[in-house]
Amino acid sequence: MGAAVPVTAALAAAQAGSVGIGFSGGGFLIPFFLGVIHVLYKDLGILSSNTPVAGGSAGSIVAMTANGVINYESMLDEVHRLSAFCRGHGNCYGTLQSEVMASAERLLPPDAAERTNKQGRTYLQITYPSTLGLEPAQSRSVNKFKSRPDLISAVASSIYIPWWAGPRVVTEFRGDMVYDGSFNGPGPGFLPCPPNITYCVRVSSMPAGFSLGSFLVDILTAGPAALPVLGPVLRTTIHGPNLPTHLANAAIAYLTGEKLSVASEPGQLAKLVHALLQLVTPGEGEADIWPGRRHKLPFSELEWATGMIRPLEPAGIKAVFELGKAEALSWAQEAGFLKTTRNKNGA
């Protein structure tokens, strides 16, 4: 007879059928999430396509992979394809939203909306700024989709990094002005969880305690310590083929945009910057799985963070993917899931 299994909060929730998972934003660090899914869903079977799942920004398309609507192997292939394309096109500065929409068109099956609605446990987070930016932005989760194009629009809105993904601070979703689902400060504004569960396995793409505000300052000032890492990113962006077109599109967007929407952007941007400057990435007690939790990062923290906007080379994709697997396995072992599996098998 096997030894008694220590019951952790996560294990107890899983045994009661009341566990869910949430994925933060992550940009081109999606391979970390895919490594986590590989272990928790494929290798160990702790979670399944019926597990409630939430995601913001890059986490939104990962959520569509976790729920089984997007084929896992196809998603991994698409990460390689999109990363290679963006490396050759100025990090997809100004075109990221359209490229993600094209990826979603390739990945989502014809009945994607129907399957997601039937599962009923997938939540894609989007940030809604207030008119004129007079009030703080609101994070809202979308759970029902009118059609496949509506689902694609939700994903494309959730990943909309202001000015980087398109020509303006905001994009449009169902008639509302919105932007990136992980750009609303710390806690659930960065890492959402599905509702009505006992325990959420919170997966962050970033090392714990990383100040996004400091990262933004490093980008803006290009200080001596940051320049060796950020310099190549800025060079490939500035000299990329997208920049002239993006600047022209931005000018057109502001000249032809609805007047109140355009007038709202300075206030909305101020609220956005304020929220981001409050964001220190979650660690112990605020997240369950993150890079560097139990295993060394394959490169420096700053290089890792830069991977959010700079597409990884194939070797980097593999290293980030393997770290996701390692961190997920360590967490599962510490939470008691591996002992449960061994006991079920009579070990």
Image: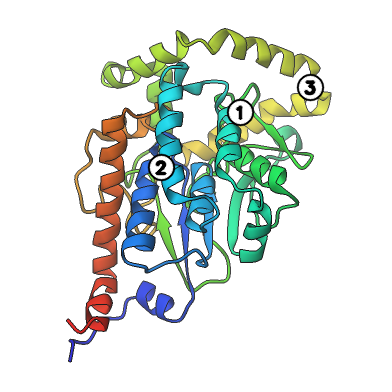
Residue at the spot of label 3: 257
Residue 131, horizontal then vertical, whole percent: 76, 37
Q: Is residue 307 left or right of residue 258?
A: left
Q: Secondary structure at mark 1?
A: helix
Q: Earlier in the sequence, mark 3 or mark 2?
A: 2
Mark carried by residue 98: 1
- At 74% across and 33% down in the image, what residue appears? 132
Q: Is residue 240 left or right of residue 261?
A: left
State the separation of the CA atoms marked 1 and 2.
19 Å
Q: Earlier in the sequence, mark 1 or mark 2?
A: 2
- Is 152 or 220 nearer to us in this picture? 152
Residue at the right extreme, as displayed: 259
Q: Which corner quadrant of the image does residue 297 belong to?
A: top left
- In contact (CB < 8 Å): disc 3 and disc 2: no
- At 76% across and 24% down in the image, what residue appears? 263
Residue 323, horizontal then vertical, whole percent: 26, 47
Measured along the vertical axis of the image, is residue 173 above or below residue 51? above
Residue at the spot of label 2: 76
Q: Quadrant of the C terminus?
A: bottom left
Q: What kind of residue is marked 2?
A: Leu
Q: Residues within 10 Å of mark 3 (few under 14, many from 20)?
A: few
- At 55% across and 25% down in the image, what residue appears? 164
Q: Secondary structure at mark 2?
A: helix
Disc nearest the viewer among 1 and 2? 2
- Is 309 or 338 nearer to us in this picture? 338
Q: Residues within 10 Å of mark 1 (few under 14, many from 20)?
A: some
Q: What kind of residue is marked 1?
A: Ser
Residue 33, horizontal then vertical, whole percent: 39, 48
Q: What kind of residue is marked 3?
A: Gly
